[in-house]
Image (cartoon, rainbow, N blue to C red):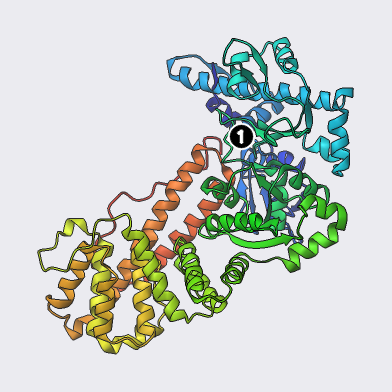
Amino acid sequence: MARNFDPVIQQIRERSDIVQVIGRHVKLQRSGSSFKACCPFHQEKTPSFHVHPDKQFYYCFGCGAKGDAFSFLMQYEGKTFPEAVEVLADEYNIEIPTVVGEDWTKVSEAAEKKEKCYQLNQWAKAFFIDRLQSEEGREARTYLEQRGISQEMIETFGLGYAPDDWGRLVSHLKEKGADIELACEIGLLKQAEASDRIYDKYRHRLMFPIVEPSGRLAGFGGRVLRSSDGAKYLNSPDSLIFHKSKLLYGLNLARKAIRQNEGAILVEGYLDVIGMHQFGFSQAVAALGTALNQDHLTTIKRYTKQVTLLFDADEAGVKAAGRGLQVLVPGGISVNIGTLPEGEDPDSFLQSRGRQAMEQLLDKDAKPGLEFWIHHLKDKADNDPVQLREVTHRVLELLQGIPDPILQNFYVKRTSELLGVEEAQLRRGFFRVVKKSEAATQRTPEPVDMAPIMETKLTVEHRTLAKLIKIVIENPDLFSYVAQAEMITKLPTPSLSQLWEQFIHDLQEGADAAFLSEMVLGDLNAEPTFRRLLAQMLLKDPRFDEEDVEDEWERLMFTLNRLTLETELQRVQTEIKQAQQINDVELWAALSADKQKLQMQLQKVLASFRGKPLLPSIPGKEPESEAPFAGG
C-alpha cells in the first residue's frame, strides 16, 4: 500500500507558513514585505538569505539556495521529499490518503521492503548502543577511552557494541517480530552454509552506524577488538539500501560544515572522522574502505568543489592520494593534500598535538594536489631522464581526463613550471597522449584518400570546424588575429575542443600554413572520416572568396558558439530531470542557476549575430521547462 501525496501538496501550500517553518531553525528579521537572515547553507556575515511570505519562497543571493517549505526541510534537515510532506502534513493536521491498485503494487512492495530494511537497522543500532553501555561492553568502552573518543562523540555517531555471542541479535530481532530472512539479506545476520541455523554476523566488534546524507541508517561497519577475529573492519554487504561505493562516512553530520567551510576534508577511517569532528573539524568524511570513484565524486560535488586529502606520508598514503587525484581533478574539484608525520593518523595527531597543529597542517602546510603528486613522482625518478619522461606521461594522462579545456589549460601551464618542460613541448606531448587514448578505442587509422565524403557520418560541429581551419590556413593575414584573439575552445566534442585548442596554440608558436596543414591532418589519424573531409577541403575544394571570408568567419564562429551552448543546455537539462527524479533540491537549484546563465549567454550570442546562421541548430527539440519537483 503506497501513500498518495499529490492531493495533499496543494493543501499544505495553502495552509503552511514558510516564515514559521524556516523561523524554527533560522533567526529571521523583517525587511519590508520579506524577511532576511544569514544563510543557513553557507557561512556569511551579511544577510543574503531572503524569505518571501507572499510567494512562500526563499532565495539566497550568496549561494543560490532557493525553494519552498518542502525544499527547506529537504536541504536543512536532510529529509526526502515524502518525509518533508509527511512532516508538514502532520503539523497542519492534513491527512495523507493511501491508494490501493495495480499501478501502485510494485512501487509499494519495493518501498515497503526498503522501510523494513531501515527499521531492521534501527532495531540493531538500538541493540548495539545498549550493549555498549552494559557490562559486556566494557572492553569496547575502554578501547574508545584509550583512543580519546568522548562520550559526546560516541552519542553523536551512535557507536555501539556487538556482543561476543552467536545469537543475541537474532533473539533481539525475533522479539521485535523482524523478518529474519531480510535481516540476513542486509547483512545483520548470516545463515550457516551446511544448515538452516541463523547467527549474528557481527560478534565482539565496535559498531559504527553508516548513515545516508538524508539521515537514514543504511548499514554498519564493525571493527575487531581482538586480532584473532578476522578482518579488521567488516561492512554491511551491498543491498537494497546499502551501497558501499556510493556512501561517505560522516557526511550526514558534515554537510552543513562542508558548506560553511566551502570545502571537505577526506580522511581514511571511521575513527579519523570521529576524531576530526571531536576537535572541531566537522567537515571531515571518509570512504568506506574503497578507493574514491565517480559516485563519490558526484556526491562531493553536491556540497563543494574543494577537497583536502589528509593521508599518511608513507608510500601507501601517497598512492591513495594519487588515486584520489585521478578521480577528483578531472571532475573539476580543487584538491589540496595534507600529509601527516610518519606513524600518525588524524586521530592520533590531534590527540598528541592538538587542534592548532592540525589547523597549521591544513591551512598552511597542505600543498595543491597536482603539485604534491608531481614533486613526489620527481623525487622517485631521481633525475633519471627516462623516468622523468614516464613521470611526464603519467601526469599528462591525468590531465587529459579533464573535460573543461580552460581548467585543463591552467593545469598544463602549471605542470610545465613544475616539471621544467617547455609548455609548447608539453602541449604537443599532451595532445599525443589524448589521441593515443582515443585511438585505443577506435579502429586502425586509414590513409588519407579523396573518396567522396559520407556527410551523414559527420556532425554540424565537424563541418563548421573544418571550414574554420580551412579559412585560417588559406588566409595568413588572419594568423596573428586568431593567435591573439580570445577564441572559443570548449566545443561540444572533447576531441574537437582539443584539436582546435592545439591548432590555435600552433598559430601562437608561429607555425606557417604548410606546418599547420601537416600537423592538423597528422593529429586526426584516429578520426579518418573527419580527416578525409578536412583533407578534401584543404587540397581539393576551391578557396573562399576574399570578400566572403569575414562574413563566413563570423557565421562559423556564431555556429560553434551556439552549438556549444545548446549542447551544454541539453546536458544541464538532463541533469535537472535526474535531480527531480531523486528529489535532490539542492542539486536542482544549482543546475537551474547554471541553466539560467547558459540561456543568458545563448541569448547574448543570438542577439550579437548580425546575419543568419550558416548551419542549422543541432537536432532535437528545445529544452523543456521544468517545475522544481512534484512538491515544489
Q: Is residue 39 left or right of residue 330?
A: right
In this view, 305 is above or below 561 = above
What residue does disc 1 label?
80
Q: Quadrant of the C terminus?
A: top right
In this view, 407 is above or below 172 = below
In this view, 607 is above or below 59 = below
Q: How many marks?
A: 1
The answer to whether residue 322 of the structure is visible from this angle is yes
Q: Is residue 622 left or right of residue 414?
A: left
Q: Residue 151 falls in which quadrant of the image?
A: top right
In this view, 524 is above or below 11 = below
Q: Quadrant of the N terminus?
A: top right
Front position in the image: 43 or 451: 451
Front position in the image: 15 or 550: 550
Q: Position of residue 625 (x, y in %)?
A: 43, 46
Front position in the image: 551 or 197: 197
Q: Position of residue 37 (x, y in %)?
A: 74, 53
Q: Residue furthest left?
A: 451
Query: Going 52% across and 35% down the picture, which residue do you hit?
Result: 630
Amino acid carrying label 1: it is Thr
Q: Position of residue 338 (x, y in %)?
A: 70, 61
Front position in the image: 318 or 245: 318
Q: Residue 201 falls in which quadrant of the image?
A: top right
The answer to whether residue 491 of the structure is visible from this angle is no
Tell me the element at label 1: loop
Q: Position of residue 357 (x, y in %)?
A: 83, 62
Q: Is residue 514 left or right of residue 424?
A: left
Q: Residue 115 falls in which quadrant of the image?
A: top right
Label 1 packing within 10 angstroms: few (<14), some (14-19), many (20+): many
Query: Going 35% across and 88% down the picture, which residue do you hit?
Result: 510
